[in-house]
Image (cartoon, rainbow, N blue to C red):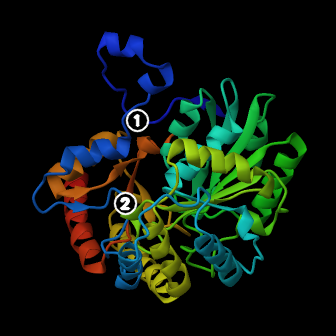
Amino acid sequence: MPQSTDIPGLSVELDDWIRESIRGAAATLPQSGIIEAVNYGRERPGLIPFWVGEGDIPTPPFICDAAIQSLRDGHTFYTYQRGIPALRDAIARYYDRHFSLKLDSGRVIVTSSAMQAMMETMQTVVGAGDEAIVVSPVWPNIYACIHIQQSVARSVALRPDEFGWHLDLDRLLDAVNPKTRAIYINTPGNPTGWVMSRNDMLAVRDIARQHGLWIVADEVYGKFVYDGRHATSFLEIMEADEQLIVTNSFSKNWAMTGWRVGWTVIPKGLGQVYENLVQYNTSGTAEFLQRGCVAAIDHGDNFLAEQVARCSAGRELVCDALLELSNVRIVKPKGAFYLFFRVDGEPDSVNLTKRMIDEANVGLAPGTAFGPGGEGYVRMCFAPSHDTLRTGVERLSEALRKRAAA
């Protein structure tokens, strides 16, 4: 049966007087398991960091130049809460060009990161006592978004085999109950690389329609697929006025993780709701950042294609090297840019992560950070340069061979 879960991560030690004087949801938010690994190894000289989801290429100059020019033009004042029209129009063009979707830019809301988009979405669709189904293992922040709303995340774990990860639709349907308000799905998936099939998406759409549920689709890695042009978007199979909210980000496609700009696509009738949430959460995203984002979308298709090609080659490099080890179990990812793998005899992923920092000087993320189905796995990002990947995998291979021989 599906599990009602706490947020994955470490519990945080608080003084009694602080714990008793602040709101329970804030007091019980744990430290991210990914950040635990980062903090453990951050200061190690020469450490190779594969623990977070980014490459090592800075944002391209043509994007930076657009933001710099915007600063020089004086775009440093308050701006549109929903995002500047030029960027919302550019996002609509992105969907037309890459997904053949005629998207009304009035459905687009620009947010201060995809994380903010997700927080505002959960503020919209769940509240105290509600439940949201979460397909896991998954990006851990989603659990916190739900928990802060005093709602329950009910996890449905993907099932791995030698051919990939699979969603059990019967288990997902079993998780639906009168308290359920939403289904959260990240495809292509972080950390597994799972890409949801179109048939499964249609089945989930029908479940949501039957029970009056919101589908919250995290499609940040939609262009990072390795056997097609892009992953299917829920926007392709649902009507404009259905209960669908799609979140996305500039971080991955255009090497803009530090810019903290994202977007969400909503039913048009929710526009004022999201404008209000933007106002009361962040009061909008800086215009000069948004001008850089316009340049990313309008002039960044070649760079995006290079990013995907580089990650595809990085996937092959990493998988080929680790498959040579007798004690490593790999499910080759079909999308995103992570390898989620197991090591025989290593059931404690936090312990293994720390040992790889100590013994190989390589930073990974522990599988426990990603919720049910994650224990026993570690996550490695293969978005960095191939030279960095080669060096890191050589270190890992040497350390894991020694573990196998011990």
Identify which residue is drawn at 55% across, 77% down: 226
Q: Most extreme residue toward the right, as rendered? A: 210
Residue 330 x %, y %:
45, 61
In the picture provided, is 93 more to the left or to the right than 290? right
Alpha carbon distance from label 2 to label 1:
18 Å
Which residue lies at the image location 40% right of the left edge and 11% below the top edge? 20
**Total marks placed:** 2
Front residue of 323/90: it is 90
Give the amino acid type for the residue marked by disc 2 in the picture. Answer: Met
Badge 1: residue crowd in 10 Å (few <14, some 14–19, many ≥20): many
Residue 348 in which image quadrant: top left
Give the number of the disc on residue 9: 1
Residue 175 visible (yes or no) = no
Q: Name the residue under label 2.
A: 380
> Residue lying furthest left in this view?
45
Q: Which mark is residue 206?
A: none
Q: Vertically, is 287 above or below 340?
A: below
Mark 2: give few (<14), some (14-19) or many (20+) Cα within 10 Å: many
Rendering coords of residue 67 (x, y %): 40, 75
Residue closer to the observer: 75 or 22:
75
Do tag 2 and tag 1 residues touch (Cβ < 8 Å)?
Answer: no
Q: Which residue lies at the image location 63% right of the left edge and 82% below the top edge?
A: 229
Residue 4 appears at what percent x and percent y? 61, 29
Q: From the viewer's perspective, is 227 left or right of 22?
A: right
Q: What residue type is labelled 1?
A: Gly
The image quadrant of residue 56 is: bottom left
**Seen in the image, is 72 located left or right of residue 42?**
right
On the image, the x and y values in percent for residue 294 come to 53, 77
- Chain-order first, disc 2 or disc 1: 1
Vertical side of 72 occupied by 10: above or below: above
